Amino acid sequence: MDFDVIKKGQDSNDTLLVFGGIQGDEPGGFLSASILATHYKIKKGSLWIVPNLNFYSIIKRSRGPYGDMNRKFKSLSKKDPEYPLIQKVKTLITDKNVTLIVNLHDGSGYFRPKTIDKKHSPYTWGQCSVIDQSELNTSKYGHLGKIAKSVVDHINAHLLKEEDKYHIHNTHTAKGDKEMEKTLSYFAVLNNKAALANEASKELPTYQRVYYHLLALEKYMQIMNIEYSRDFKLTPAGVKYVINNGIFISLYNNKITLPLTNLRNDLYYFPITKDKKIKFQATNPLVTILQKKGKYLIQYGNRKLTFLHPEYINYDDSNDSVKIAIDGNVSQYPFGSIIDVKDNFLVKDSKKYRVNVIGFVTKNKKETDIKIKKSNIIKRFSIDKKGTTFRIEFYNKKKFSGMILVRFLNQKTPKPKSK
């Protein structure tokens, strides 16, 4: 599986390149990169982000199904399944516009310069800024030790607890560290590119790892005079919210849109085209759909969100809108809409479409021109576990035309205030 390169800001020969997901069992790293890609706006400067470097590894929740990708940059057989990906990464690193590279990792324990115990020692990797050497003979950002100290100091000014304290971990790779010689960062250093890694501890909950990674990334952007804004507050609660909310997937040219928060484990009789191919766009680069044993799995990073149990059907080509009264107010809504409802909704009758409100039972021949409340719909047919969001499906004769979701507001989770 290929990775994404998301370019933000303006074209520049002074670009920050951020990698997440080189190892699929380190969610703090790849979630941080995805948040940087989706929740930050770059006002000045240039930022490139690879949030899903080893996407297959992420999906498998594995350090590396074909071996550790971060040990393949010194030499690699052309027969290795990841050889094309490694060559693409090398091309990205050596791009003339890239001047600083940050690789995000989750490491074991808490790095300490001297051994305290098994969890706190020079042999653990969590909570540190990793450099291969202190100095690099390059025109920009060659003082790797000073940069690392600046990042570490910034993080340590915003600790959640004292144990989380960051330190600099200089591996002195050129002095004979055979393992580190194989890494992405050392490949960059050998090509005269400033490169560092940021490690967050696997002892921490994922959202706290992301909190520390984002603190580091914001400092790197400050060092490079990259101006930015974000749409959430950089606190553990704010980070936890953006990890779990505000992610959507659209299917078949926006005929269907699903919010990916708190979905039921299984969605049944889901309309899929008869060719069994599913076309989708997601608002987050870590979201994908995988076909498994006749079902379609929506996955976010290494989290399995829901299985779509297909009802194979022909689609029509219309991309229409329909009239719906929401709490008495009539408007046109395009297919793929998600509509908030306080009390009731009513789908206006149309000669063109047959309407099916999933979970609503009536003796009428049609499900249009009927005022429907939440209590009128069987809860288990909701798409979410809280029982607030329901499907309205539209059919043109025997063809599926589109879907609209209605979301009853009485159980809506409030969003933390932005900074």
Image (cartoon, helix red, strand yellow):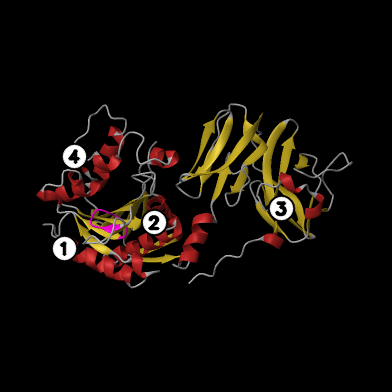
In the foreground, 57 or 226: 57
Q: Nearer the viewer, mark 4 or mark 3?
A: 4
Question: Callout 1: 10 Å neighbours few (<14), some, many (20+)?
Answer: some
Q: Which circle's residue, 4 or 3, is located before the other in the chain?
A: 4
Residue 373 falls in image quadrant:
bottom right
Disc 3 to disc 2: CB gap under 8 Å: no
Question: Callout 3: 10 Å neighbours few (<14), some, many (20+)?
Answer: few
* Distance between mark 4 and mark 1 Cα atoms: 23 Å
Q: Which circle's residue, 1 or 3, is located before the other in the chain?
A: 1
* Distance between mark 1 and mark 3 Cα atoms: 59 Å
Where is residue 348 shown, x and y percent of the image? 80, 49
Q: From this view, report whether residue 130 is shown above or below residue 232.
A: above
Q: Which circle's residue, 4 or 1, is located before the other in the chain?
A: 4
Q: Nearer the viewer, mark 1 or mark 3?
A: 1
* Distance between mark 4 and mark 3 Cα atoms: 58 Å
Residue 373 in sight in this render: no
Residue 371 in sight in this render: yes
In the foreground, 367 or 156: 156
Q: Which circle's residue, 3 or 2, is located before the other in the chain?
A: 2
Disc 1 to disc 3: CB gap under 8 Å: no
* The disc label shown at residue 372, or none: none
Residue at point 11%, 49% (across, down): 174
Task: Give the labeled residue for mark 4.
Answer: 74
* Distance between mark 3 and mark 2 Cα atoms: 50 Å
> Does the magenta run of residues contain 122?
yes
Element under disc 2: loop
The part of the chain drawn in magenta is: 120-127
Task: Give the labeled residue for mark 3.
Answer: 332
Task: Give the labeled residue for mark 1.
Answer: 143
Task: Give the labeled residue for mark 2.
Answer: 203
* Distance between mark 2 and mark 4 Cα atoms: 30 Å
